[in-house]
């Protein structure tokens, strides 16, 4: 009898190892990453806001699900710069808020078609990041960080006062006008039934499409020769120069790509809220994206997305809890210190440790 049990256990292990090996052959494919991302964003709003038991525990809502994806795009782009290139920018609010204002003004003065609004905001962010990157990358280390912060603060004060006739000053830009997608699809309407059970409104579908595209683009960049060069610059900039790489040009392109991601996210933020607050250009926005990226795990594709989810959850849901809601800043600080202290690789580091444990159990190679 003991032999039968032993044989059964070996067969289960063999089947498990076979499934694991099969998974290993496809896990790195771009199509697999895209499929997993699509599946995740498809069920996320339902699990977060409407699933039995789970939604009661989380107390999430669908509007926050869209906002998490928007900040996720922002975090993916920022991590390309911080986690993969080793450049710490404290001025990414310039691209996030600048794109938000550009998108809002474009919607009010030129066209409110959502795709054109996103294109206008992203174009502004790309051009701005090109100029600020060219100027800031002339210095490295802390000087680079301070320069980016200074440029972003200059934009904040320009939006607050000299350009108040255009930006509406401290009141923020309130004249955002979003038209139906392609002129026929109202983003505020629900998706057709029964898909609406999972996705809710068309606005979420619109944001989710950009989110999936952002993940795929970032994955392709990181797994291309260009991504390898960025990692080489992060590990040893001088050695990268010695082998003939134009380090400054690669860093500038990384800065521009990161700015483009921030531009897409800032434009979607305008469409999502129909409003552009002046605070979107303030230095605290730059600080938040640094915290989100480090909390989730700098140098990983999906870690910053988890960081964005946790940060926004505490900010928007936990802050509404009766007794501890007013202490949400303190709670967020404790979470940040605890995660970084115990798990320096962030939330994604925890996920990878669990994955390693499962891999060992399944008999895979480390």
Image: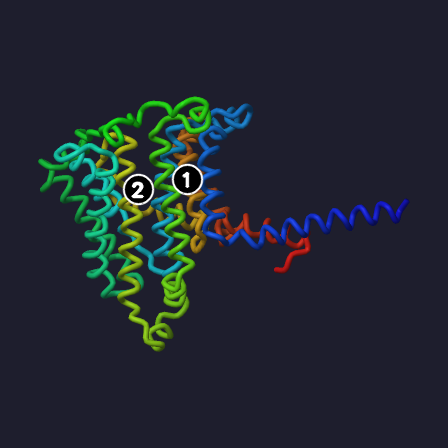
Asked which quadrant contains residue 157, the reply is top left
Indicate the quadrant where residue 318 lies.
Answer: top left
Tag 1 secondary structure: helix
Residue 119: x, y in percent?
23, 43
- Give residue 311's quadrant in the image: top left
Mark 2 secondary-structure assignment: helix
- Image location (x, y in percent) of residue 137: 25, 63
On screen, residue 49 above or below 75: above
**Residue placed most toward the observer, 136 or 227:** 227
Residue 311 is tagged as 1
Crowding at dot 2, Cα within 10 Å, few <14 / some 14-19 / many 20+, comes out as: many
Q: Quadrant of the C terminus?
A: bottom right
Q: Is residue 289 left or right of residue 54?
A: left
Query: Few, some or many C-alpha atoms within 10 Å of disc 1 (few <14, some 14-19, many ≥20)?
Result: many
Residue beneath label 2, please? 265
- Closer to the N terminus: mark 2 or mark 1? 2
Question: Image point 25% across, 38% down: which residue?
Answer: 115
User: Measured along the vertical axis of the image, is residue 9 above or below residue 172?
Assistant: below
Residue at horizontal 53 percent and vertical 51 percent from the top = 27
Image x and y of residue 161, in percent = 11, 40
Report the side of 250 relative to 121 (left or right): right
Q: Decide which of 359, 322 is in the foreground and name it.
A: 359
Q: Nearer the viewer, mark 2 or mark 1?
A: 2
In the rendered image, the quadrant that contains the N terminus is: top right
Percent x, y for residue 47? 50, 30
Front residue of this view, candidates 192 and 83:
192
């Amino acid at each position: 009898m003991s032999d039968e049990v032993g044989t059964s256990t070996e067969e289960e292990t063999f089947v498990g190892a076979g499934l694991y090996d099969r998974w290993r052959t496809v896990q790195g494919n771009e199509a697999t990453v895209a499929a997993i991302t699509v599946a995740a964003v498809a069920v996320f709003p339902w699990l977060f806001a409407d699933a039995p038991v789970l939604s009661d525990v989380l107390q999430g809502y669908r509007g926050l699900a869209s906002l998490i994806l928007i900040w996720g795009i922002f975090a993916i782009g920022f991590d390309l710069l911080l986690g993969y290139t080793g450049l710490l920018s404290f001025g990414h609010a310039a691209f996030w808020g600048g794109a938000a204002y550009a998108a809002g003004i474009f919607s009010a003065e030129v066209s409110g078609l959502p795709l054109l609004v996103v294109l206008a905001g992203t174009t502004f962010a790309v051009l701005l990041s090109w100029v600020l990157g060219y100027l800031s990358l002339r210095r490295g280390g802390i000087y680079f960080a301070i320069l980016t912060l200074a440029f972003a603060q200059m934009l904040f004060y320009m939006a607050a006062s000299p350009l108040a006739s255009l930006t509406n000053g401290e009141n923020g830009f309130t004249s955002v006008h979003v038209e139906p997608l392609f002129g026929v699809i109202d983003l505020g309407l629900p998706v057709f039934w029964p898909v609406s059970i999972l996705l809710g409104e068309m606005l979420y579908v619109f944001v989710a499409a950009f989110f999936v595209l952002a993940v795929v683009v970032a994955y392709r960049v990181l797994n291309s020769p260009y991504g390898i060069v960025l990692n080489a610059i992060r590990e040893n900039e001088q050695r990268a120069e010695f082998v003939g790489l134009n380090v400054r040009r690669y860093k500038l392109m990384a800065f521009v790509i990161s700015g483009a991601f921030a531009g897409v996210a800032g434009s979607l933020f305008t469409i999502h809220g129909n409003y552009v607050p002046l605070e979107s250009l303030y230095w605290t926005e730059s600080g938040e994206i640094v915290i989100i990226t480090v909390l989730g795990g700098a140098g990983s594709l999906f870690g910053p997305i988890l960081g964005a989810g946790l940060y926004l959850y505490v900010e928007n849901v936990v802050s509404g809890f009766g007794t501890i809601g007013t202490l949400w800043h303190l709670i967020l600080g404790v979470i940040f210190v605890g995660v970084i202290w115990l798990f320096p690789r962030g939330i994604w580091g925890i996920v990878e440790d669990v994955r390693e444990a499962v891999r060992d159990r399944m008999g895979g190679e480390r």
